[in-house]
Amino acid sequence: MKFVTSLIAVKDVDISKAFYCGLFEQKVVLDLGWNVTFSGGFSIQQNFGWLLGLPEESVVTQAHNMELYFEVDDFDAFLVELSARPEIRQVHPPKKHDWQQRVARLYDPDGHIIEVGESMAVIARRYLTEGHSVEETAKTIQHPVAFVEAAANGKI
């Protein structure tokens, strides 16, 4: 068996397509009208209730039980882009986790949570550039030494 995609229900496929193509730089891989698949490996579906044979009003919005996760190399540039879009509701202000990753969480037009995190490879390279050892960096960012070494060698 092969996993193909995650699919999220949306009210208006055109609004959601513009949102993901704009802010998240997704490319449309397949556009079937009510169903669109993006280069990031996920899909959106308008009329989800109809597809499943369920009442449209039974499709839950803003369930707070899943999120789509993106990483960016330049987190500061993403925050500038996000601040230029005041219509986008944030789940919380940007914050930094114990593993030193800065993240922002926001809602898409249908209330799905989107997390945008600073690339862990970028964080590893930053710590190494600052003079920390591979082992110190691995401990600080709570990732395996092999991950830090791969980041240092440009393999991730």
Image: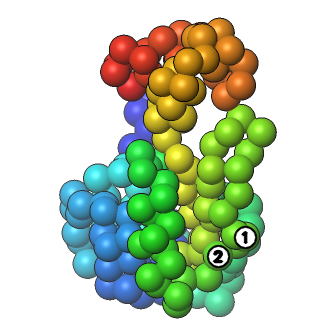
Instruction: Please give the count of numbered marks on the rendered protein.
Output: 2
Distance between mark 2 and mark 1 Cα atoms: 5 Å
Question: Residue at point 77% right, 39% down?
Answer: 98
Name the residue nearer the viewer: 76 or 114.
76
The residue lying at 52 percent from left, 90 percent from top is 87
Based on the displayed image, in which of its 4 quarters is residue 66 positioned? bottom right
* Helix, strand or loop for disc 1: strand
Question: Which corner quadrant holds the C terminus?
Answer: top left
Q: Residue at x 54, y 83 (%)?
A: 88
Question: On the rendered structure, is 76 left or right of 154?
Answer: right
Question: Can you give x and y, in whole percent of width and height, for residue 70 in the image?
Answer: 48, 52
- At label 2, which amino acid type do we have? Gln
Direction front: furthest residue: 131
Is there any visible trace of residue 69 in the rendered image?
no
- Horizontal side of residue 98 vs 52, given as left or right: right
43 and 103: which is toward the camera: 103
Whole-percent x, y for residue 93 in the image? 70, 69
Label drawn at residue 65: none
Q: Quadrant of residue 56?
A: bottom right
Give the amino acid type for the residue marked by disc 1 in the picture.
His
Residue for badge 2: 90
Q: Does the CB distance between marks 2 and 1 fall below 8 Å?
A: yes
Quadrant in which residue 112 is drawn: bottom right
Return the x and y of residue 4 as percentages of the image width and height: 39, 44
Q: Which residue is mark 1?
A: 92
Q: Badge 2: how crowded within 10 Å, few (<14), some, or many (20+)?
A: some
Residue 54 vertical position relative to residue 2 in the rendered view, above or below: below
Q: Is residue 18 above or below residue 147?
A: below
Q: Nearer the viewer, residue 111 or 86?
A: 86
Q: Is residue 145 left or right of residue 58?
A: left
